[in-house]
Image: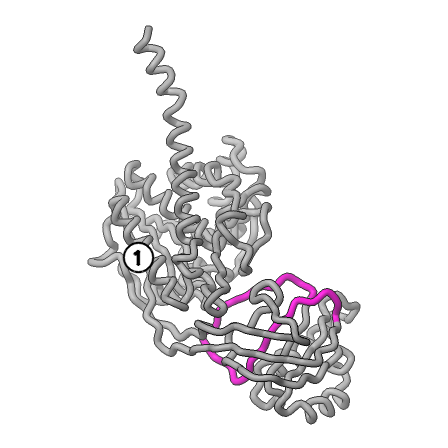
Amino acid sequence: MHNKFLVLILIWIIPKILFGQDLSYAKEIVETLASDEFRGRGYVQKGERIAAKYIKDEFDRIGLEPVKKSYYQKFSTSVNTFPKQMKVVINGTELVPGKDFLIEAGSPGVSGNFNAITLEISDILNREVLLNKLSESSGKFLVIESYERTDYSKEELKEIDELTNFLRYHPDNPALGTLFLTQSKLTWGGSTVQYSKPSFTIKVDSSVIEIEELSFDVDSKFIENYSSQNVAGMVEGESSDSLMIFIAHYDHLGMMGDKTMFSGANDNASGIAMLLNLASYYRTNKPKYQTVFIAFGGEELGFIGAKHFVENPPFDLSRIKFLLNFDISGTGDDGIQVVNGSIYRDKFDLLTEINDEKKLLQKVKIRGEACNSDHCIFHMAGIPCFFIYTLGGIQAYHDIYDTAETLPLTEFEDYFKLVTLFVNQL
């Protein structure tokens, strides 16, 4: 009786231990990659290289084989960085980087005290007024009022966007730089170029503020040939004729100055968590096809690592049966979105059929083509693929609030189960 009771307990508890272990491993990965040590996985203090080594070591620990002699595939990129000072003072008040302001990712450094000229949106749409104000702007900063919550027509908004982009980037603008006021969420990015003029976005409560004193102390460093890497490993399958590919990018936005970090927990430590969990699963559960796991660098700079991989493939790309891209995998309260779902409708229908049968995620939503992550480069090369991302939950994205502490991994286990059931039926 004692032995039978023990067997029943083990039968009941082992699946829960395994699922808990998957989620525990995912949380560990996210917490590690989003920690201070990894510097936001950007190019200041080589955070992205620290992340790549971590993934390589995990591939090795899991027991993956390198796709070639090394897990690394090297590539280079130009990148603009902000490694040191990031100080903005307006009307005597020092602003908090990431919370109160952002610097445009392609900005040069700037230091000193400056005067400002305010441009209202009506000024921008009136060419005579605009030219008069520009003629007075040499050596000064242009302050452009917020226009997100206005009643301008689509045509007027398009014209405003075109003109403000000219003011932000064009060297013929006589102003020293620009400040854009916004009432919207601050969302940062990366840049492979450095522009001739600095530009800042300032979070404000009202569309116009009177700026009397303006001071900056900002360092930038443009790196023309930064050496980065993709990380790739594989497991053998029952058949080596076709390949199943799992991808996720590991890079993020890094540092804006030496104190403000963009941790990138959901984007995309969570996708790497899914990638490594799948690697661990298929290492012990032999897949139908030879399966390759790729962690890409340079995604936030414009899919740089993915482009290099497709242009320099370590295997014949025509062997790829299907590719899944995981970018933002940390919520799932409202289900998942499947980019290219309408392109590969039979695969999408299979995915939804499994989800409906197993009652895993609340919804599997279909979407068409979208060049918004690394899958795009493979899709343009004719490789069948989905890009799947989770929906609902926290809205932190490309900001300082996308941290491991705020990422719930709500449906990670069910999402993982759906992916494996889907892949195993391909």
| Numbered disc 1: secondary structure | helix
Q: Which residues are magenta?
A: 183-207
Q: Residue at x 33, y 45 (%)?
A: 279
Q: Quadrant of residue 205?
A: bottom right
The quadrant the C terminus occupies is top left
Q: Residue at x 44, y 54 (%)?
A: 34
Q: Is residue 363 above or below residue 109?
A: above
Q: How is the image coloured?
A: one colour
Q: Residues within 10 Å of mark 1 (few under 14, many from 20)?
A: some
* Image spot of residue 353 (x, y percent): 51, 36
Q: Is residue 384 above or below residue 96?
A: above
Q: Mark 1 — residue?
A: 53
Judged from this view, the residue extending furthest toward the top is 1
Judged from this view, the residue extending furthest toward the left is 69
The quadrant the N terminus occupies is top left
Q: Quadrant of residue 16?
A: top left
Amino acid at dot 1:
Lys
- Regarding residue 90, the answer to whether it shows in the image is yes
- In front here: 153 or 393? 393
- Regarding residue 343, the answer to whether it shows in the image is no
Q: Quadrant of residue 46?
A: bottom left
Q: Residue at x 52, y 67 (%)?
A: 189
* Image spot of residue 308 (x, y percent): 35, 67
